[in-house]
Amino acid sequence: MKLRQKLLSTFGGLAVLALLNAGVTGWAIYNWQISNRELNNHYQRSLLIKELRMRVINATQVIRDAISTGEPNARSLFETDIAPVQPYFRDWLKLAQDEAEKKQINELKNAYLVLLKDAEEIFQLLAEGRTFDALQSRKAKLHQTSFPLFEELAAQAI
């Protein structure tokens, strides 16, 4: 074998290795970008759920304070605390990856709507001056039924 053939075969082998290296590097970068995007979406969804959960917890604290102190602006404070929750659900639905997650969003939203209905009932009782009934309703419905269900579903979603 001549020197020229040896050099050509050596440099040909090096060229193939360089192309293979470039291909593997490109493939790894592409997969890393996909993984990074998925992880970022996961963190965004988790943060939305946590923020949603905190808004609901703060709003339920307003109900407790309204019963114990008779705060006249409690309903408006509650509505202010709970106002961003609907956009959070909408944003979370946009980030949902599959049908199972969309189902989970709908379950949590239904639990949230039940919690809102119970809160509305409590505020109605307070408006009628029936503080004791509002306290009983808070214990029976809000703390034993709707809020624990909401908490459980939110924890599963996180």
Image (spheres, rainbow, N blue to C red):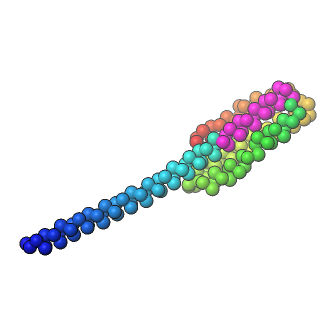
Q: Is residue 59 magenta?
A: yes
Q: Quadrant of residue 98?
A: bottom right
Residue nearer the viewer, 65 or 111: 65
Residue nearer the viewer, 103 or 57: 57
Magenta part of the chain: 51-70
Residue at the location (58% across, 51% down)? 101
Q: Position of residue 50 (x, y in %)?
A: 63, 41
Residue at the location (21% across, 69% down)? 12
Q: Is residue 72 magenta?
A: no
Q: Is residue 4 left or right of residue 151?
A: left
Label count reads 0
Compared with 70, 91 (above or below) is below
Q: Quadrant of residue 136?
A: top right
Residue 69 at least partly seen: yes
Most extreme residue toward the right is: 128
Q: Is residue 44 left or right of residue 67?
A: left
For the stretch drawn in magenta, the main secondary structure is: helix
Q: Is residue 76 left or right of residue 111?
A: right
Q: Is residue 103 left or right of residue 15?
A: right
Q: Position of residue 113 (x, y in %)?
A: 74, 45
Most extreme residue toward the left is: 1
Q: Position of residue 39 (x, y in %)?
A: 51, 49
In what quadrant of the picture does the N terminus appear?
Answer: bottom left
Residue 150 at least partly seen: no
Residue at the location (73% across, 46% down)? 84
Q: Position of residue 143 (x, y in %)?
A: 72, 31
Compared with 61, 114 (above or below) is below
In what quadrant of the picture does the C terminus appear?
Answer: top right
Residue at the location (90% across, 35% down)? 127
